[in-house]
Amino acid sequence: MTANTFGTLFTLTTFGESHGAALGGVVDGCPAGLPLTEELIQKELDRRKPGQGGIAATARKEADAVRLLSGVFEGVTTGTPIGFLIENTDQRSHDYSKIKDTFRPGHADATFEAKFGLRDYRGGGRSSARETVARVAGGAIAKELLRTAGVHVQAATVELGGIPAVERNFGGALSRPFFSADENVVASWEDRVRQVKGDGDTLGGVVEIRATGVPAGLGEPVFDKLDARLAYALMGVGAVKAVEIGSGRQAARMLGSENNDQITPEGYVSNNAGGILGGISSGQDIIVRVSVKPIPSISKEQRSINRQGEAVTLSIGGRHDICAIPRIVPVLKAMVLLTLADLLLLQRRLGR
């Protein structure tokens, strides 16, 4: 048994593998009457599909065309489970035949086999980043629910390959390479990608997500804190290694007088808390930063072992991104959307 469902009231269940026939999911708990079309979901999917990211992108090409199977009638949700399907059309499973008995460093090969006693070696199977296509589709549905409550979520890349962005212009991020928050840093990022690509290596980065219009009161004061829910959601994305809320790690280096967000009759003076106090939304913008590790599939020779425990060396071929950014940006945004939609419905159910 694996945990394939996210959420409590607004839930997303995903299915499918990287090199299987299709991926998809079921969203349950979505209220009736929300406008929803395949075109609306497709707009979000197009931002993460293979081939995005310019010189950092994989050569795999997938249309990621979504089909709505249920839960929508005449362009609006019916209140019943919303099923959707996205077919795989450009798999090349033979690319992985040479490493089917070898554990790739940085991948889930060894742990997957330790848990299940077998694994789908074709692109990582269920543990592949390809699974996140269903999360983006689910997030698109959550986006429509949150829109009715005046909540909006944006995401942008704020660091790539150790080079940070200086500005935070989220409004134009979707039209920039890497979904960058700063147009002035793009050229430096492109140079860094070329260098690393030439070396047969990969890069990591940092993505920032901001949610505006979030009402005060979402989240619980003990085990279901909003920041804990967000961290759980974002750490559930394969390449994520750290999550920061508000001032994050910098808070450990600040004085209390510096970190506290003082309050005036006009509102908070600052937002070091990232819009969350005591696990509950304060009404300020929710600010989250996510650290993304380098893609583990590299052409440089590495040491590992095979299924018999014998030492081997390997170089990973096939078609891979140089960096999970920018394709991971809409995935992380989707996880924040799903979390906020779920907590919004929980708050409404409690009548608060």
Image (spheres, rainbow, N blue to C red):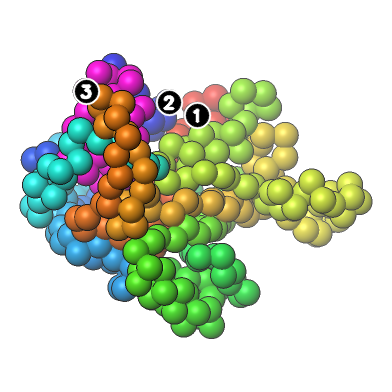
Q: Residue at left 84%, top 52%?
A: 254
Residue position for label 1? 346
Q: Position of residue 168 (x, y in %)?
A: 59, 71
The image quadrant that residue 311 belongs to is top left
Q: Which residues are magenta?
A: 107-131
Q: Residues within 10 Å of mark 1 (few under 14, many from 20)?
A: some
Q: Residue at left 82%, top 51%?
A: 253
Q: Position of residue 59 (x, y in %)?
A: 19, 64
Residue position for label 2? 8
Which type of secondary structure does the marked residue at label 2 adopt?
Answer: loop
Residue position for label 3? 118
Residue 43 appears in the rendering = no
| Amino acid of disc 3 | Leu
| Amino acid of disc 2 | Thr
Q: Quadrant of the C terminus?
A: top right
Q: CA distance from mark 3 to mark 2?
A: 31 Å
236 falls in the magenta region: no
| Amino acid of disc 1 | Leu
Q: Residue at left 25%, top 24%?
A: 308
Q: Which is more toward the observer, 122 or 50?
A: 122
